[in-house]
Image (cartoon, rainbow, N blue to C red):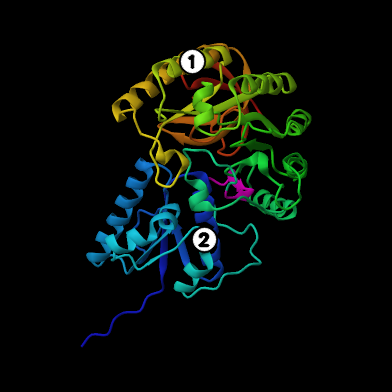
C-alpha cells in the first residue's frame, strides 16, 4: 500500500467585495506568513491545497458571486485538486447556518471577527503583536488603511451593521505605526477606509478625531498621498477640511456617499439629512478647499421612489456637478429597516433609472475632463498595459475613478510620480504626456 505523500500547506485567499475585505485578507496573509504557512492571493498557479474564500454579502449580486465562488472551490475539492475549503467574511457572518446546510462540503465557516478561530483550524497561532503586519494584495506603491470596523448608523437599506457590528475605532498610535510600516515597504499612497470615516474616535476618545489622525498620518515620512473614502455627511467634522487644505500630502479628494437628493427618499432611507443641508455642506466643502474633487454614490429604485424623485436626483447632479459619481440599484436585504417596505420598483426599471442618472453624470464628467486639456497634473503611475502607462491624479482613486493614459518613448517607473500635461480628454479618462519627473 502506497503511503500518502506529506506536503507543506499552501493557502490561496480569494477576496470578494470591497477594499475593507481586501485589507482583512491581507491581515490573514500576514498572520499565516508569521506562522510559516505559505500564502498567496488569488493565485492562478493552482499549486495550493487550501483555499480561503473571503466573501461579500452586501447586495444580491455580491452574494450570488460569493456563493458561486464557493461552489467553484468545492467542485475543485471534489475533484481532488484541493484538500480544504474555508469560508469567511460578510456572507459567512450573516448566513452561516443556511450555508452550512446548503453547502456541507465546506470544511469550516467563520464570521468577520473570527480570525483567531480560523488560524487555529489551520494549526496556526494568532499573533496579537503583529499590528499592521499584512501581505499587500495591492501594488507596492499604494495600500488601504482601515481605521475602524463596523457602523453605528441605521440607514434603512444597509446590512453592514448586521455583518460587521457596531463601530470600533483603532487607536491613532496603532494606525500611525501601520502607516510607518507601509511607508518603509515603499507605499506612497494610503487610502483611509471605514464604513464611516467621520465617526472615527467617538467610541474610544469620546470625540471625533479624524482631523487629529490625519495630522499624525501626514507627518509619516514617505507617504505622499493620503486619500479619504466614505465620509458620512450628517454631523460632518469640518475641521478635517482645514487639515486637508494645510497639508500638501492629503489629497484634495473626498468620497462622500449621499445616496439621494429627494427629501422623501432621504427620510425613508434614514439618512438624517435633508437636501438643503447637503447643499449647504457641499458649498462649505468647496469654499474651504478650493478645487476639491467630490465623489459620491447614489441609490436608485428604493421602495417608494417615483419618477419625480429620479428627475429631482438628475437635477441635483446638474446643479452640483460632482467630479465622480457611482450608482447602485436598490437591493432588498433581509433584516434591514427597509425590508418591511414593499420592493415596488421592478429590477428592469431600477436599472433603467440608474442608466439615465449616469448618462447625466457622463456628460458632466466629459465637460469637466475637457477643461483639463492643456493643464499639468502630478500623476502616480500604477501600471503598464498594452504598451501604455496608466496613472492617476490626486483627484482619482484606484479602480473607481479616472485614469490618465500616457504614451512614452522612455521607460516610466511604476509607483513613481511625474508631471503630465493633458492632451486629450474622454468621458471618464484623460490622455497625457510626461513633462517632468518628480
- Binning the other alpha carbons within 10 Å of mark 2 as few (below 14), some (14 to 19) or many (20 upward) gives many
Q: Residue at x 56, y 68 (%)?
A: 34
Residue 286 placement, left or right of 155: right
Q: Is residue 273 above or below residue 98?
A: above
Residue occupying image coordinates x 42% and y 30%: 302
Question: Does the stretch in magenta take in 141?
Answer: yes
Residue on which disc 1 sits: 312
What residue appears at the point 38 percent right and 39 percent down from the top-left corner? 332
Q: How far across and down, in percent of the image, does residue 63 sit? A: 36, 47
> Measured along the vertical axis of the image, is residue 149 above or below residue 389?
below
- Residue 285 seen in the figure: yes
Q: Quadrant of residue 214?
A: top right
Q: Which image quadrant for residue 88?
A: bottom left
Residue 103 visible at all: no
- Foreground mark, 1 or 2, reads 1
Q: Quadrant of the C terminus?
A: top right
**Secondary structure category for the residue under label 2:** helix
Tag of residue 28: 2
Please state the extent of the stretch shown in magenta in the rendering. Answer: 138-150
Quadrant of the image containing the N terminus: bottom left
Q: Are marks 1 and 2 in contact (CB under 8 Å)?
A: no
CA gap, disc 1 and disc 2: 45 Å
At 39% from the left and 17% from the top, the residue drawn is 307
Indicate the position of residue 421 as horizontal and vertical percent values: 59, 18
Element class at badge 1: helix
Query: Which labelled disc corresponds to residue 36?
Result: none
Amino acid at each position: 500500500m502506497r503511503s500518502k505523500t506529506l506536503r507543506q500547506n499552501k493557502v490561496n485567499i480569494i477576496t470578494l467585495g470591497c477594499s475593507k475585505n481586501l485589507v482583512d485578507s491581507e491581515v490573514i496573509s500576514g498572520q499565516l506568513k508569521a506562522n510559516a504557512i505559505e500564502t498567496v492571493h488569488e493565485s492562478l498557479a493552482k499549486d495550493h491545497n487550501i483555499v480561503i474564500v473571503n466573501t461579500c454579502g452586501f447586495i444580491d449580486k455580491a452574494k450570488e458571486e460569493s456563493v458561486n465562488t464557493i461552489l467553484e472551490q468545492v467542485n475543485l475539492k471534489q475533484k481532488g485538486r484541493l484538500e480544504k475549503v474555508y469560508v469567511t467574511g460578510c456572507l459567512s457572518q450573516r448566513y452561516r447556518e443556511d450555508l452550512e446546510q446548503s453547502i456541507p462540503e465546506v470544511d469550516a465557516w467563520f464570521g468577520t471577527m473570527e480570525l483567531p478561530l480560523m488560524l487555529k483550524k489551520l494549526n496556526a497561532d494568532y499573533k496579537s503583536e503583529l499590528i499592521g503586519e499584512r501581505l499587500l494584495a495591492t501594488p507596492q506603491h499604494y495600500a488601504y488603511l482601515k481605521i475602524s470596523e463596523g457602523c453605528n448608523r441605521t440607514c434603512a437599506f444597509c446590512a453592514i451593521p448586521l455583518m460587521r457590528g457596531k463601530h470600533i475605532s483603532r487607536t491613532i498610535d496603532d494606525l500611525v505605526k501601520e502607516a510607518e510600516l507601509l511607508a518603509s515597504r515603499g507605499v506612497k499612497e494610503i487610502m483611509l477606509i471605514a464604513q464611516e470615516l467621520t465617526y472615527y474616535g467617538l467610541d474610544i476618545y469620546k470625540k471625533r478625531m479624524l482631523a487629529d489622525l490625519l495630522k499624525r498620518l501626514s507627518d509619516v515620512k514617505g507617504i505622499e498621498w493620503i486619500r479619504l473614502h466614505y465620509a458620512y455627511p450628517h454631523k460632518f467634522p469640518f475641521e478635517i477640511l482645514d487639515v486637508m487644505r494645510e497639508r500638501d500630502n492629503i489629497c484634495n479628494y473626498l468620497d462622500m456617499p449621499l445616496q439621494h437628493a429627494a427629501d422623501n427618499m432621504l427620510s425613508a432611507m434614514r439618512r438624517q439629512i435633508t437636501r438643503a443641508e447637503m447643499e449647504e455642506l457641499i458649498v462649505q466643502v468647496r469654499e474651504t478647499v478650493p478645487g476639491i474633487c467630490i465623489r459620491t454614490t447614489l441609490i436608485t429604485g428604493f421602495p417608494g421612489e417615483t419618477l419625480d424623485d429620479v428627475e429631482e436626483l438628475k437635477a441635483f447632479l446638474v446643479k452640483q456637478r460632482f467630479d465622480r459619481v457611482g450608482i447602485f440599484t436598490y437591493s432588498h436585504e433581509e433584516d434591514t429597516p427597509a425590508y418591511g417596505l414593499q420592493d415596488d420598483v421592478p429590477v428592469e426599471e431600477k436599472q433603467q433609472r440608474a442608466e439615465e442618472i449616469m448618462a447625466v453624470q457622463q456628460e458632466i464628467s466629459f465637460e469637466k475632463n475637457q477643461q483639463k486639456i492643456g493643464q499639468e497634473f502630478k500623476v502616480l503611475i500604477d501600471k503598464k498595459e498594452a504598451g501604455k502607462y496608466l496613472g492617476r491624479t490626486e483627484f482619482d482613486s484606484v479602480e473607481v475613478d479616472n485614469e490618465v493614459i500616457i504614451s512614452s518613448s522612455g521607460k516610466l517607473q511604476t509607483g513613481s510620480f511625474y508631471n503630465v500635461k493633458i492632451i486629450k480628454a474622454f468621458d471618464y479618462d484623460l490622455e497625457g504626456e510626461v513633462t517632468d519627473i518628480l
